[in-house]
Image (spheres, grey):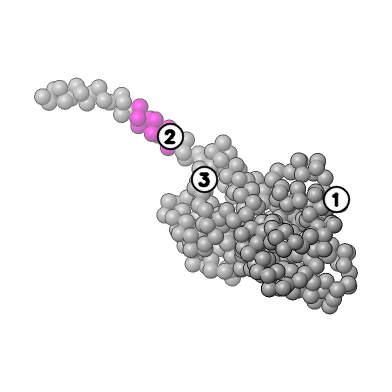
Amino acid sequence: MRRKIIIFLLCLLPLCCFAGCNRAKEEETDEKLIVVGFSQVGSESDWRLANTASMVSALSEENGYHLLFDNAKQRQENQYLAIRNFIQQDVDYIVIAPISETGWESVLAEARAAGIPVILVDRQVNVEDQSLYRSWVGSDFYREGTEATAWIDRQFADRPLRILHLQGTEGATASLMRSKALYDAAETHPSWQIEASLKGDFTEAKGYEVTRDFLSEGGKFDLLYSENDNMTFGAMQAMDEAGITYGEEGTVKIVSFDCVKNALEECLKGKIDLCVECNPLHGPRVDALIKACEAGEELPRLSYVEEIAFSSDTITRELIDSRGY
Ligand code: GZL
């Protein structure tokens, strides 16, 4: 019996070696892949979908990555869970699109204690200890806001102006800064009256609901300042239902942020008067930051993406067709 067992085992030997080599080869191949855990805010807007697509495309196996992706569904506690899971899996890098600025000290300290570099994209985090993350790439949201208020000033100067303000997710840098730009401009334009600042959470559904309720309570406004395109789409539906016209020929002017494709189409139709771009294509920048880190280079603390604005008289079909999102 022993002899048979030995012969049987000898027959298995090449298979084990192959499997072992094969495993070693896989490990060797896997060793070449940089493992990245990415905690994404959610899928609340067209902008977010474009941001996710850019990150997934850049952090691909072809580019040398093994990506672990988590969608937090707009809940910060889900981001905490995902990051701790990435730490347990001992990933090489953690990338976070933080839903809001506060509440990050503990989980970022855990990543640092585990020796895992953290890169932030899009919104920022408000932490004393700057060593809790290596680098951030995103937009200058306050500049986006001043781009919008400068346009409003050119259109209305010091004429009386009633503004309806739709705010994005509470505590998100994009909302905090776009709101601050509006409030600062209203300070220097006494004839501008912010009728209400309503919380739309960057979603179309909420943008519709809060605008519909404002109108049904007799609210009036001459300009909609909406902190993202999806809330704008919701507000447009509420205005349609209330028989309120908007855009170039309408009674209400619309200023919107993001410049997602559907918003630029509405701008081309003259329905949205100003679209302020917020560039979601962070993937290639994060890829470059990680590769620089791998090469032992010092990372820039902040990297701002380039952005512009389009009005209904500057947008063209060619521009829309030429854009990456
Ligand atoms: C901006 C980003 C915002 C977008 C919204 O960088 O944080 O979140 O403006 C998205 O569309 O939901």
Q: Nearer the viewer, mark 2 or mark 3?
A: 3
Query: Residue type at mark 2?
Result: Glu
Q: Is residue 22 magenta?
A: yes
Q: Could you tell me how far apart the alpha carbons at marks 2 and 3 are, in whole angstroms?
A: 17 Å
Name the main secondary structure of what is drawn in magenta. Answer: helix
Q: Nearer the viewer, residue 32 or 102?
A: 102
Residue 199 position within the rendered picture, expressed as x and y whole percent measured from the top left? 64, 68
Residue 88 lies, with reference to residue 166, above or below; the image says above
Residue 138 position within the rendered picture, expressed as x and y whole percent measured from the top left? 67, 56
Compare marks 1 and 3 and give the one earlier in the sequence.
Answer: 3
Residue 137 occupies quadrant: bottom right
Horizontal arrangement in the rendering, residue 296 relative to residue 162 (left or right): left
Q: Secondary structure at mark 1?
A: loop
Residue at 68% over, 66% down: 211
The magenta segment is 18-28
Quadrant holding the C terminus: top right
Q: For mark 1, what is the residue?
A: 314
Q: Nearer the viewer, residue 86 or 57?
A: 57
Residue 67 position within the rendered picture, expressed as x and y whole percent measured from the top left? 51, 45
Q: For mark 3, what is the residue?
A: 67
